[in-house]
Amino acid sequence: MATQAFDRVPQAPGETPDNKVILDGFRAGKLLLGKCLDTGKLFHYPRHVSPFTLSNNVEFVEAKGTGEIYSYSVARGKEPFSVAYVKLDEGPIVLSNIIECDLDSLKIGLKVKVKFKDSDGGAPVPMFVLA
Protein backbone atom coordinates (compact mmCIF):
# COMPACT_ATOMS: atom_id res chain seq x y z
CA MET A 1 0.00 0.00 0.00
CA ALA A 2 1.30 3.46 -0.92
CA THR A 3 2.23 5.96 1.77
CA GLN A 4 0.98 9.34 0.59
CA ALA A 5 2.78 12.42 1.91
CA PHE A 6 0.64 14.33 4.39
CA ASP A 7 -0.37 17.76 3.10
CA ARG A 8 0.70 19.90 6.03
CA VAL A 9 0.97 23.67 6.20
CA PRO A 10 4.57 24.57 7.05
CA GLN A 11 5.45 26.98 9.83
CA ALA A 12 6.30 30.46 8.59
CA PRO A 13 10.02 31.20 8.61
CA GLY A 14 11.04 33.90 11.06
CA GLU A 15 12.00 37.07 9.26
CA THR A 16 15.04 39.13 10.20
CA PRO A 17 17.01 41.84 8.39
CA ASP A 18 19.60 39.16 7.55
CA ASN A 19 17.18 36.84 5.73
CA LYS A 20 14.77 39.39 4.24
CA VAL A 21 16.38 39.11 0.78
CA ILE A 22 15.93 35.33 0.79
CA LEU A 23 12.34 35.48 2.00
CA ASP A 24 11.50 38.17 -0.57
CA GLY A 25 12.89 35.74 -3.15
CA PHE A 26 10.59 33.01 -1.82
CA ARG A 27 7.64 35.41 -2.11
CA ALA A 28 8.61 35.98 -5.75
CA GLY A 29 8.89 32.23 -6.38
CA LYS A 30 12.70 32.26 -6.48
CA LEU A 31 15.07 29.92 -4.69
CA LEU A 32 18.20 31.95 -4.00
CA LEU A 33 21.76 30.80 -3.48
CA GLY A 34 24.68 32.74 -2.12
CA LYS A 35 27.61 33.32 -4.42
CA CYS A 36 31.07 34.10 -3.06
CA LEU A 37 32.46 36.73 -5.42
CA ASP A 38 36.01 35.96 -4.28
CA THR A 39 35.87 32.27 -5.28
CA GLY A 40 32.83 32.05 -7.59
CA LYS A 41 31.44 29.21 -5.45
CA LEU A 42 27.73 28.90 -4.73
CA PHE A 43 26.39 28.04 -1.29
CA HIS A 44 23.19 27.41 0.61
CA TYR A 45 21.86 28.69 3.07
CA PRO A 46 22.35 32.10 1.44
CA ARG A 47 23.82 34.60 3.86
CA HIS A 48 25.78 37.82 3.75
CA VAL A 49 29.13 36.20 4.66
CA SER A 50 30.90 33.66 2.46
CA PRO A 51 31.48 30.30 4.18
CA PHE A 52 34.60 29.93 2.02
CA THR A 53 36.41 33.22 2.73
CA LEU A 54 34.40 34.79 5.58
CA SER A 55 34.21 37.98 3.51
CA ASN A 56 31.01 39.88 2.80
CA ASN A 57 31.83 39.93 -0.91
CA VAL A 58 28.65 37.97 -1.64
CA GLU A 59 25.70 38.26 -4.00
CA PHE A 60 22.43 36.35 -4.22
CA VAL A 61 21.67 34.44 -7.42
CA GLU A 62 18.57 32.55 -8.49
CA ALA A 63 18.81 28.76 -8.65
CA LYS A 64 17.03 26.84 -11.39
CA GLY A 65 15.15 25.02 -8.63
CA THR A 66 15.92 21.57 -9.99
CA GLY A 67 18.08 18.80 -8.64
CA GLU A 68 18.03 15.25 -7.31
CA ILE A 69 17.46 13.48 -4.03
CA TYR A 70 20.85 13.11 -2.36
CA SER A 71 19.54 11.44 0.82
CA TYR A 72 16.15 11.17 2.50
CA SER A 73 14.17 9.80 5.40
CA VAL A 74 10.47 9.02 5.72
CA ALA A 75 8.53 9.46 8.95
CA ARG A 76 5.58 7.08 8.84
CA GLY A 77 3.31 8.31 11.60
CA LYS A 78 -0.23 9.62 11.59
CA GLU A 79 0.94 12.40 9.24
CA PRO A 80 3.70 10.83 7.07
CA PHE A 81 6.33 13.10 5.54
CA SER A 82 9.80 13.00 4.04
CA VAL A 83 12.83 15.07 4.91
CA ALA A 84 15.51 15.07 2.22
CA TYR A 85 18.80 16.53 1.21
CA VAL A 86 18.41 17.74 -2.37
CA LYS A 87 21.52 18.33 -4.45
CA LEU A 88 20.68 21.26 -6.68
CA ASP A 89 21.83 21.21 -10.30
CA GLU A 90 24.12 24.12 -9.38
CA GLY A 91 25.87 21.98 -6.74
CA PRO A 92 24.79 23.12 -3.26
CA ILE A 93 22.79 20.72 -1.10
CA VAL A 94 19.51 21.89 0.46
CA LEU A 95 17.59 20.37 3.37
CA SER A 96 13.88 20.32 2.61
CA ASN A 97 10.78 18.14 2.28
CA ILE A 98 9.61 16.04 -0.66
CA ILE A 99 5.86 16.56 -1.00
CA GLU A 100 2.86 15.48 -3.10
CA CYS A 101 4.09 11.97 -3.76
CA ASP A 102 3.95 8.33 -2.73
CA LEU A 103 6.69 8.27 -0.10
CA ASP A 104 7.34 4.59 -0.85
CA SER A 105 8.48 5.57 -4.37
CA LEU A 106 11.32 7.83 -3.18
CA LYS A 107 14.89 6.85 -3.90
CA ILE A 108 18.28 8.48 -4.10
CA GLY A 109 18.90 10.06 -7.50
CA LEU A 110 15.27 10.87 -8.35
CA LYS A 111 14.91 14.23 -10.09
CA VAL A 112 12.98 16.91 -8.21
CA LYS A 113 11.96 20.53 -8.66
CA VAL A 114 11.15 23.25 -6.19
CA LYS A 115 7.57 24.12 -5.28
CA PHE A 116 6.79 26.97 -2.92
CA LYS A 117 4.18 26.05 -0.34
CA ASP A 118 2.19 28.69 1.52
CA SER A 119 3.11 28.83 5.18
CA ASP A 120 0.94 29.62 8.18
CA GLY A 121 1.22 33.37 7.75
CA GLY A 122 4.69 34.34 6.53
CA ALA A 123 6.74 33.79 3.41
CA PRO A 124 6.12 30.62 1.42
CA VAL A 125 8.50 27.73 2.06
CA PRO A 126 10.48 25.99 -0.69
CA MET A 127 9.81 22.27 -0.83
CA PHE A 128 10.35 19.76 -3.62
CA VAL A 129 8.13 17.59 -5.83
CA LEU A 130 9.16 14.80 -8.17
CA ALA A 131 10.10 16.23 -11.58
Image: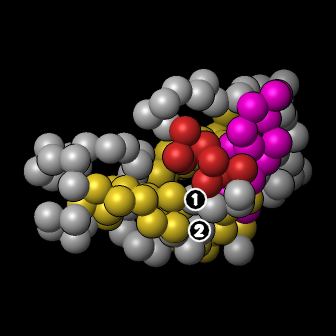
Residue at image mark 1: 31
* Disc sitting over residue 65 in the figure: 2
Residue 10, magenta (yes or no): no
Q: Distance between the residues labelled 2 and 1?
A: 6 Å
Residue 80 placed where, x, y %?
77, 35
Residue 38 placed where, x, y %?
14, 64
Residue 90 placed where, x, y %?
41, 73
**Image point 69% across, 43% down: which residue?**
125
Packing grade of label 2 (10 A; few <14, some 14-19, many >=20) is: some
Side of 48 relative to 18 (left or right): left
Disc nearer the start of the sequence (2/1): 1
Q: What residue type is labelled 1?
A: Leu
- Quick one: 119 or 77, which is closer to the camera? 119
**Image point 57% across, 59% down: which residue?**
31
**In the rendered image of this protein, does residue 32 appear above or below residue 126?**
below
Which quadrant of the view contains residue 8?
A: top right
Residue 6 in sight here: no
Q: Which amino acid does label 2 sit on?
A: Gly
Q: Tell whether label 1 touches label 2 (CB within 8 Å).
A: yes
Which quadrant of the view contains residue 61?
A: bottom left
Which residues lie in the magenta part? 116-129
Element under disc 1:
loop
